[in-house]
Every structure is written in C-alpha cells, then in structure tokens.
Amino acid sequence: MPAPKLKELRRAYGFDEVAIVPGDVTINPEQTNIDLKIENTTFSLPILSSAMDAVVDVKFAALMSKLGGLAVLHLEGLQTRYDNPEEVLAEIARASKDEITPLLQKVYSQPIKENLLSERVEAIKKAGGICAGSVTPANAKRFAPIVTEAKADLLFVQSTVTTARHVSKSVRGLIFPELIKSIKIPVVVGNCVSYTSCLELMRTGVAGILIGVGPGAACTSREVLGIGVPQITATIDCAAARDAYQKESGRYVPVITDGGFRKGGDVCKAIAAGADGVMIGSIFAQAKEAPGHGYHWGMSQPHAALPRGTRIKVGTTATLEQILFGPTSVTDGSQNLVGALRTAMGVCGAFNIREMHKAEMVIAPAITTEGKSWQLAQS
C-alpha cells in the first residue's frame, strides 16, 4: 500500500532563539536613520504603541507623537465607552485576581458612544499629536467616517486575525479597497503571520500591515485557540511578501511586528528579520504616563464568552522618554530602546532600516543564557 501523505511541520523561531551577526563594517550609532514612513507620514522612530486601554489615552498619544513615534488609540475601548475612563481604569487596577475577568467583561459591555470617538481624536489633534485610532473589522465601516471627519491621520483596522477574504452572513462585509477609497486616509491592517495572507492584504491597497498573532504578554490566544506563529518567522515571511508585492506593484508597504517585545534586543531582532517598525504594549504599559496604573490587559480580555487575554502586573518603571531614549539605570534592556536599535545597526554597518534587513541572523537557542550563570544565579 502507498504510504499516506502526512501533515508536514516546519520549524519556526521566536526572539530568544535567534541572534544578529555583527557586520564587517561598523558605523557610529548616531549616524543611523531609523525613520518609518507610512504613505505620506514619516515618523522619526519606527516604534508604535499598542492600541490598548492600559497603554494609550489622549495624553499618552500626544506625548508619543512629540517624541517621534506613534501611539494608536483603542477606539472601541474604555476611552469611547466612558466620559471619565480614569475612574474605570482605577477600578480595574484595584480589582483582585478573582474579580478582574468578570469586572472587565462588565465594563466593556457598556456601549460605545460615537460622540466620544470624535472627541478623543480631536483632543489628540488639539494637543499637537498625530492621531491614529484602531477599530475592529466589524465596526470599521460604521466608525471610519466619524474618525475621518474628526481629522484623524491614520486608521488601524485590527483583530486577532484579519484576512483579505472573509466569509460571513453579511450580504456585504468589510471590503478593504472600498473602505480605503471612501475615507482617503491611510489604513493599516492587522493582524497576520503568513506570506499569502500578507500579500493578499497588500493587494487591497492598505498602507501597512501588523504582524503577530498571540505573542503579546497579556494575550492568551495561543493557549485558548492554539493559533499563532513565533514572531521572527512571522516577520521573515511577511517581509518576503512585502518585497514580492513591491516588485509586483512598485508600492512599498511597511510591515510592523506587533507584540512579544520584552527588551531592546527583541526590537533589534524584529528589524533585522525584516520589520519596518515595531508595535509595543507591555513595555509602554510600564511608563509613568500610561493610563493602566502599572497593569496591562489584552484587547480580547473582555469577550463575554471566550476571554483571550489576561490582566498582568507590569509595574511602573520609568517615564516614556526614558523607556525610549534613556538615561537608564537598569541593565535588562527594557529601557532606551532607541539607543539599543541604533547601536545594533551601528555594529551591523546599517545606515538605515532597509540596510538592517540585510543583516545576517543565526539560530541561537542558548543566546539568552550563554555564559550568563552569574546573572541567572542573582536574578
């Protein structure tokens, strides 16, 4: 009898399993260019903050913009369900471990107030910030015109997994080319982890793609649903789709690795793997300016029947400016992320992000523990 055809698995890699090989030429870190361009908007930092209620509010978004990055406001979260979300955020921080999931399910059951969508966007713009707001695919057609009229600069359409083709009971679901044409501001879409899904999304005309399913510190999708691809492999695959799409169309669509970051080295590895930028949640939830009071929780946490996120205590460690630029007195790589990226690019001889994509990488299962016995013993 012929042997049955079996499902084949390939090895995939996360941040801790790879390392970047230094280049043959080194350059001064301050000579590196780390700009991120999304259509006609250029950011001096390739760093975005996650659209999560514990990370971004109006003040945080304005500050992040001032520092050169981009903070994405969760337009279906507490900021648009409550006139005074600070009270709810404080209640979440006070809740015990047994109380937290039912509490989150309760507070997120309140309806979204459409007037608050406009008010939050306008407040960020009034504070001098570049405004990006995030909505789910289910609400994109409804909320996009409101956000656009309020003068938002970018729209993010995000869910655990987003594809260019979706089957539903709706007569006409969300069609990205139509959405993009109707609102005339850049639309960034997420999340995906595969070459084919990324390529198909780019062909719809989107301005950027978010890469990552389930890697976030507060996300449990991998445990609850069993889905996801480790971030290095996901980034490499989607970067290949970006390059193929550029050859096909002449358009360069940036890919942004979203989630799973714990330290500067992870940011450097994501860029070397092919990312044009990174989106960070838990590290920024530690900022003094973050609205979560030292806690962080995932966007899927409040689901009424199948919560896929958990509240975690991250603590408050430094200002946002210190986390991005230092100075830092900690040695774990969780602060001065920009300095880490520029230094890594310098030792790889990369003058810009595109050149950093060419850096050699190796599989290195022991990279975080090699020769570190004294550190491990004292941690």
Image: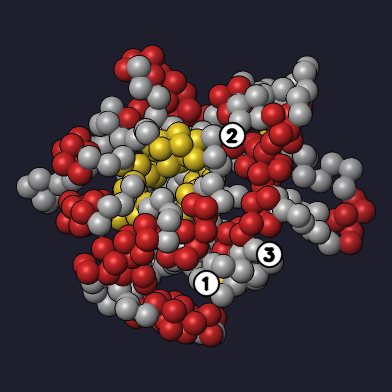
Q: Residues within 10 Å of mark 3 (few under 14, many from 20)?
A: some
| First along the sequence among labels 3 and 1 | 1
Name the residue rendered at 47%, 23% in the picture.
Answer: 240
Q: Secondary structure at mark 2?
A: loop
Q: Specify whether 235 is left or right of 348.
A: left
Above or below residue 311? Residue 97 is below
**Most foreground residue, 46 or 177:** 46
| First along the sequence among labels 2 and 1 | 2
Report which quarter residue 46 is drawn in: top right
Identified by mark 1, the residue type is Gly
Q: Which mark is residue 318?
A: 3
Identified by mark 2, the residue type is Ile
**Most foreground residue, 166 or 153:** 153
Q: Mark 2 = which residue?
A: 34
Name the residue rendered at 31%, 69% in the picture.
Answer: 80
**Most foreground residue, 8 or 142:** 142
Name the residue rendered at 11%, 50% in the picture.
Answer: 170
State which mark lies toward you, 2 or 1. 2
Q: Secondary structure at mark 3?
A: loop
Q: Mark 1 = which residue?
A: 292
Between marks 3 and 1, how big is the CA–CA gap? 14 Å
State the residue lying farthest toward the left.
Answer: 171
Between marks 3 and 2, how big is the CA–CA gap? 23 Å
Identified by mark 3, the residue type is Ala
Q: For the C terminus, give its image quadrant.
A: bottom right
